[in-house]
Amino acid sequence: MSLDNHSALIEQLKPLLMEPNFQEIFQQLTTDESNSTRFLLKMELNRLASPCTRIIDLRDKSELPCTEVMLGQQRHFLDEPAKHSLLEAMSLYRNQYTLGVYEYVLTAHQQRKQKLRQGTQTDSFESEPFMVPGVVLGSYFNRAEERMNYSIRIAVSQPGRPEMPGITVDLSIGGARIRLAANHPFDLDKPLKVKLLELSEEYYYPDLQLGVDYQIVDSQTNGEFIWLRLRRIGGTDALGEMLGNLIRGYKLRYKLDVNDVLVTASGLGFERHYLPHLPHLPLYLNQQTQSISHMLLSRDNQQIVHYFQDENDISQLPAMLTPARLSALLNHPENPDYGLFFSFTYNAQGALYFYSATLAELKAKGLMSLFLGFASTKPSWRIFKLIPDKIYHAKGYRRATLPGDEAKYSPLVEQQLALFSHMLQLIDLTNEDERATYKAWQDDSNANALKAFGQQRLTAHQIKSVSMQFSERRQEARFAFKTLVNVSQGGIKATGITLDISGRGMQLTLDNPAEFVANKPLMISLPKLQTIAGKTQLDNLPYRLVRTRKNGVTLHLAAVMGHTPHVGVEFLNKLIAHNKQKLEQLTENNSEVKELADGLKNILLRELHSVPYFVEKTTKSAQVACLGVGTQRDDISDIFAAGTSDALQYNLAPLLKDGFFKREILEPIRQMKPQQDMDFIEVFIQLTRQSRGQIHLKCILASDVGDEKAKVMFISQSKMAGRFIALRIYRGATEKPDISYLRRELEYINVHANHRAKQLEEQLWRIIGVGELLDITQEVELRYPALHQKST
């Protein structure tokens, strides 16, 4: 079994290897792994952390001058880049020279030499502009307590065995790491009594004079020394308090290790750039009712929510995701047909009726051609992918990143989160440009056969909306509410329907796209509400355009506040106040809802089924800064990791080379505003395997492949040669970074490694764009009846 799929998890665990509570952290982060995988992971981590006796001598291997570097009794000869690699690697292993450090330095040296042989002596961006690192998202962990690189003399003993001198390598309240001579007389299966000699000279505690009992957690040895990881099992509370005061008092004089906090803070910073643009709708399955009870709203996924609202603002989503369909989906994890949904609506006498079917149902009933051909002619035609993931409650829910952080939310929120058995992501795969390809499925059957797919109409809300908390979000609560609205700006006029309202703003969808400008007021009228407004005139109300979505169809408006009261604001505030019990509230502002939203968000980020990417500006232009990856493998990042020797390194050159990055990603992002939804392009990929396990990727923009016949041929040839993959590449502009969200982590890092805190903050400020890579292969192959008929 290979551990290649767990490189992100291994990278995360490295900074915690020497911790007394490492076993607990390891168990928590590998809850959903098999015992054999856990065993292999632990073996690999122990191998990387084992002390190394090998000497690194680059004097005859480097074109640069080498100087002597002493590590303990070992003499190494390194050039400047190798010295930098050594310091970088040793910070991950508690400043110990381990096998992981040795391998890291040699690999970095070999890669540098290879670049030189290729004649590229420029910086890494210019030589490999599309080789990008991965940043781990959604995995929050912390040390149980702060540990200080603190060396003092100790005396160690066991009953019936002589006392032996040694030193501490680091020290915490509940544990220590010590070094003894390798020829010690002790039984490592029994506790040790440790006297902290230098502390007992300075502080008088009976515990210090008599010695403190420690349990041995782990041991590593070379020919000369043995290093023991210890957990304190004896000593009084007063001793613990004294050690805590000591560590706090010496923080500024001794180095605290902050690698674990830095890894997590990086993930937090990048997730805040991505989550406002999350285009998919996370849903949470209540294991008691076996139904969807909560949904998590981002700024960009509310179009999915609004699609399922009927004329009374009641969400008909639960009527599509029936218990029978959810059960079939969870019982057939290997069959993607149960997760592909097709939907359209029918308006009859002012009432909205929803029709939906899964691909599995259409195949079973022989109605695939009829449904796809008929439904794709409707303006309301949609394709959704539903992907379920089991929730592993043992991992916990709360982000606890600093020593001493509370690991749980309030009891009520913990109780709510414990009720969810699965998180499901509803992904809108609809591509309006491909509607015509589905029409080709049309057959001559009677459309009345589709009545079997009519959804049962729901008359009450069944799913609670929880909004993710962003610093830039609207201050007021928003409520789902539909009413007719007329909009004008100069000679441009349009009609539409509100989707939601608040006291000072509203979101509305127009019957037809309109090109309103943002720097002039829009005048709106609410004719249907005029009948209940009495003498209040609800016309020519000034609003400003905050942002547009869906190519000018969806507008976000905010009231233009002047010196006199705004009639629209006064009326809507009264309307909301008098109907608060009847209106569905989309956002709330109390602490329990914030905690619940945070917990649901953390569960989501563990199981992303797309790969976020981040674009940063550089001194010359811009580049992809990194990919967002999880601790579990995913097929998309896997294909770009093939051929790279480093963990968490991805080669995007097959996708982005030959001007593709600038033309298709960077320039569109520069034309967008942060308030706009992400848009997307589609790419067809032919993956062929070559000798020695290497793969070759041929990536072509779908629109460049040619007509429908050419696309069918490309897909068929790709399958014959190896594999066909279709990617949807989302792209959008980012807001300024939400630094306040990771302020505590940055302040902590700043105290102990201020240059690293500054580097992270500067990088987050450089991010100008965000997007994601989404696998849409199944849906793309379904577009072409000719392809489907060939395969059956």
Image (cartoon, rainbow, N blue to C red):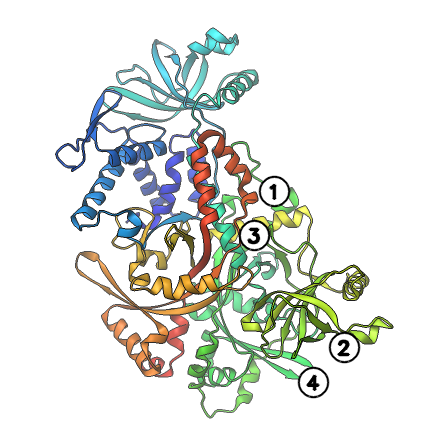
Amino acid carrying mark 1 in the image: Tyr
Name which of mark 1 and mark 3 comes first in the sequence. Answer: 1
Residue 792: where, in percent of width, then height? 33, 80
Q: Residue 527's mark? A: 2
Amino acid carrying mark 2 in the image: Pro
Please give the residue where the numbered disc 4 appears in the rendered image. Answer: 349
Nearer the observer, 94 or 233: 94
Amino acid carrying mark 3 in the image: Leu
Please give the residue where the numbered disc 1 appears in the rendered image. Answer: 409
Name which of mark 3 and mark 4 comes first in the sequence. Answer: 4
- Work out how far the residue at label 2 is from the one at label 4, CA to CA, in angstroms: 20 Å
Residue 741: where, in percent of width, then height? 56, 44
- Residue depicted at x 44% and y 43%: 29
Q: Residues within 10 Å of mark 4 (few under 14, many from 20)?
A: few
Amino acid carrying mark 4 in the image: Gln
- Work out how far the residue at label 3 is from the one at label 2, CA to CA, in angstroms: 39 Å
**Mark whose residue sits in front, 3 or 2:** 2
**Mark whose residue sits in front, 2 or 1:** 2
Q: Residues within 10 Å of mark 3 (few under 14, many from 20)?
A: many
**Mark whose residue sits in front, 2 or 4:** 2
Residue 582: where, in percent of width, then height? 76, 65
